[in-house]
Amino acid sequence: MIELPEAITLANQINRTVAGKKIIEAEAAHSPHKFAFYNGDPSAYNGLLAGKTIGEAVPRGAQVEILIGDISLLISDGVNLRYLYANEKVPEKRQMLITLEDNNKLVASIQMYGGLWVFPAGDFDNEYYLAAKNKTSPVTDAFDKAYFDSLFTDNTARLSLKAFLATEQRIPGLGNGVLQDILFNAQMHPKRKVGSLSGDDKNVLFEAVKSTLKTMIEKGGRDTDTDLFGLPGGYKTILSKNTVARPCPVCGGEIMKEAYMGGSVYYCPACQKIG
Ligand SMILES: [Zn+2]
């Protein structure tokens, strides 16, 4: 599932590859899917998009918004977006196919769930989209230590670090995936309570959020997800489904995996203290 580093990577790749190209045809909902979400009638998408030129792609948390004339196409996490050259085979299973003037294509497919929303530019009432647009992105300079400190309130003291960092859209695009290496780098346990953090701990956590995301973005996203060309990201995850059988890279101990708050958490019980 893509998160902020992968959304930034996808947006950069779209801007380099398809921005400025005209759409010849836009097909949506080719393959039926219970958890593919569209805005309005997907058969109207062609009328809204055909003939228009692809503008800028903008990362929005874990989503990517592509501006197409006076229309936005918002692609959520859970959507696999691929660029196809004219001579490549179009997959039979797909939820969206955009054919460009040079006959290259963008094809989107959804595995578990995902949104492919088309709407008048900027005007969409979706909580993830609005949070990503209105809240401070952790990769901006505005997300500084003072801003990070402002996220701690009386209500957050009882939360675990996972709940604090990766739920409620508190930090747009920071989800359960990137969380794992942030907490590993901070040497903190996902279940540790926010209220147990000292002032120094908050500094360490802030630095881990900034530096881990920065590295993930510089490397073109995590190796657990694929980019616009179907290639895994260049960031080698420390803790993920890819590394679960390996020993801790710091102490050599066993990495634990457990279900916690609607997703797996990975941690080294020796390096990541619970409090
Ligand atoms: Zn360890």
Image (cartoon, grey):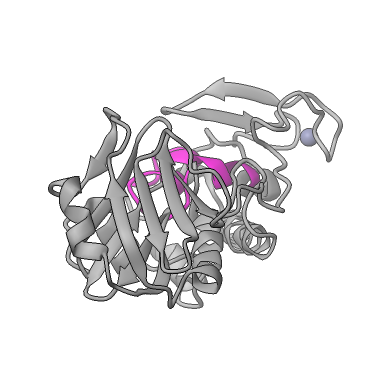
Residue that extends furthest to the right in the rendered view of this protein: 252
Q: Quadrant of residue 68?
A: bottom left
Q: Look at the image and say whether residue 180 sits in the magenta stretch.
A: yes
Up-down relation of residue 95 to residue 261 (above or below): below
Q: How far from the left and from the top, in percent, is residue 199?
A: 56, 59
Q: How far from the left and from the top, in percent, is residue 189?
A: 60, 36
Q: Quadrant of residue 247?
A: top right
**76 relative to 72 in the view: left or right:** right
Q: Nearer the viewer, residue 101 or 94?
A: 101
Up-down relation of residue 115 to residue 218 (above or below): above
**228 relative to 172 in the view: left or right:** right
Q: Nearer the viewer, residue 70 or 184?
A: 70
Quadrant assignment for ligand 1: top right
Count of numbered tags: 0
Residue at 48% x, 69% y: name it: 18
**103 relative to 40 in the view: left or right:** right
Quadrant of the frame with the C terminus: top right
Residue at 30% x, 45% y: name it: 115
Looking at the image, can residue 152 be seen? Answer: no
Up-down relation of residue 213 to residue 239 (above or below): below
Q: Look at the image and say whether residue 169 sits in the magenta stretch.
A: yes
Looking at the image, can residue 106 be seen? Answer: yes
Q: Nearer the viewer, residue 274 or 180?
A: 180
**The residue stretch that appears in magenta:** 156-181
Residue at 42% x, 46% y: name it: 108
Residue at 38% x, 44% y: name it: 167
Up-down relation of residue 29 to residue 254 (above or below): below
Q: How far from the left and from the top, in percent, is residue 215?
A: 68, 61
